[in-house]
Amino acid sequence: MLYGIKMASHFSGVLQLTDLDDFITPSQECVKPVKVDKKQGRSVAKIQIEDDGSYFQVNQDGRMQKLEKAKITLNDCLACSGCITSAESVLITQQSHEELYRVLRNNKSGAEEQKVVVVSVSPQSRASLAARYGLSSTEAGRRLTAFFKNLGVHHVFDTSFSRTFSLLESQREFVERFQRKEQDKKALPMLASACPGWICYAEKTHGEFILPYISTTRSPQQVMGSLVKRYFSGQQGLSPQQIYHVTVMPCYDKKLEASRPDFYLTEDETREVDCVITSGEVLKMLEEEKVSLKDVEPAPLDTMFSSVCEDELQRHAGSGSGGYLHHVFSHAARQLFGEGVPELTYNTLKNKDFQEVTLERNGAVLLRFAATYGFRNIQNLVQKLKRGKSPYHFVEVMACPSGCLNGGGQVKPLPEQSNKELLQQVEDLYRAEHPLVPEEDHRVAELYKSWLLSLGEEKAKELLHTQYHAVEKAGSGLTIKW
């Protein structure tokens, strides 16, 4: 079916920065028709465009059917270069807490097609909900486990577990890139790839120039997708299609990430992550159920895919966006130069969202890393790269100012709170968890050995890495400034 998409409202507030004209105003219409099959993206009909701009579907018997415009707001899309494709819009409609409720109702109705429902919660979302209800992050995790299971969810996991895979793979990828930097001019700087808003922007705005710099390592969400649909399903004696996998994330862009064709299992006709809901949507679910998280009786944590030590959830050191800079820097210093770095010193440059870390020996800089958050800083980074002026070996790139803990999908402040106060509270709760060293996670090491390596190197790489695609801009009468 073909959909014409009418842009109906602005982007989420996170991207409405002062010097970016990055959304289509309500008075503008941008229609980008794409022929898609809802399930697999196959062409299913011929499309005819009339002189007045109307779209008609021409059926095999020659009959013509006028196609109505499907409206979609851009609240769920952060980094679009002026339009969102209709294929993306169809998938976004399937990314909501209403869809989770639909699957749970279907299970309870005794319908023939039953799903095993798995929810994977990000530590940033957990901290956001903990702040709203005055709980510790781990206590919020226990109560969220109970809340979801009371609704009919079967398993609740923690994406800090899958992030350990992402960090280990990022460390290895950086060392490999550093060692071939003389032969490959685009091996460095390696740009972190966990933020889908940044990836979407890079693909649609800078294309082939920027993509070689971006790490191929999957985000924690999509590593968890591999774990749940490719490993857990086998352990449970299920097909991937029999599992409905939901993630709880701090940002709307994760909905688009889950919808990428790269994360669709063609043979099994299912996505690795079926539905993404934000921290704010979980709050809405609690309110709809007339339940305070504080009053939910806590349940034991599911430990199969959760980072737990002595019944307490763990986090990774470094930033609240995953700690990529911290872990890649520490590993590279040790692996490449034999230097132990017990503590990193961050130097703030132009603003608090642009920080730098260096490793020096005898006055010479061996490693220079940066954390770059927010699109103003990202633009500066890209322009330096284009001029050949970037001094960095690695950059942790995040679209949201202040990173993932401040994601557009997080719980909003109460009337008596300021954004700054809430963010500080969320950061404190996040950092209160005991830090986890990726190399010391024995269960992850066991999965590498028993599952990934048994599949072979190429298959293991497929499950933990991905690829990117330059998106050709459609001509529209719009003036988009980036």
Image (cartoon, helix red, strand yellow):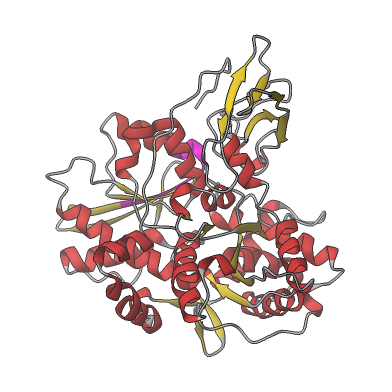
Residue 372: say if magenta. yes
Residue 375: say if magenta. yes
Q: Which residues are magenta?
A: 369-378
Picture residue at 54% right of the left edge, 49% below the top: 259
Quadrant location, the N terminus = top right
Residue 8 visible in the current orientation: no
Picture residue at 58% right of the left edge, 31% below the top: 45
Residue 169 visible in the current orientation: yes
- Give residue 472's quadrant in the image: top left
Q: Is residue 306 toward the left or the right of residue 147 in the image?
A: left
Residue 102, position in %: x, y? 75, 61
The correct choice, above or below, for 11 with respect to 472 in the image is: below
Residue 218, position in %: x, y? 41, 57
Foreground of the two, 143 or 454? 454
The correct choice, above or below, for 144 with respect to 371 in the image is: below
Q: Is residue 395 toward the left or the right of residue 85 in the image?
A: left
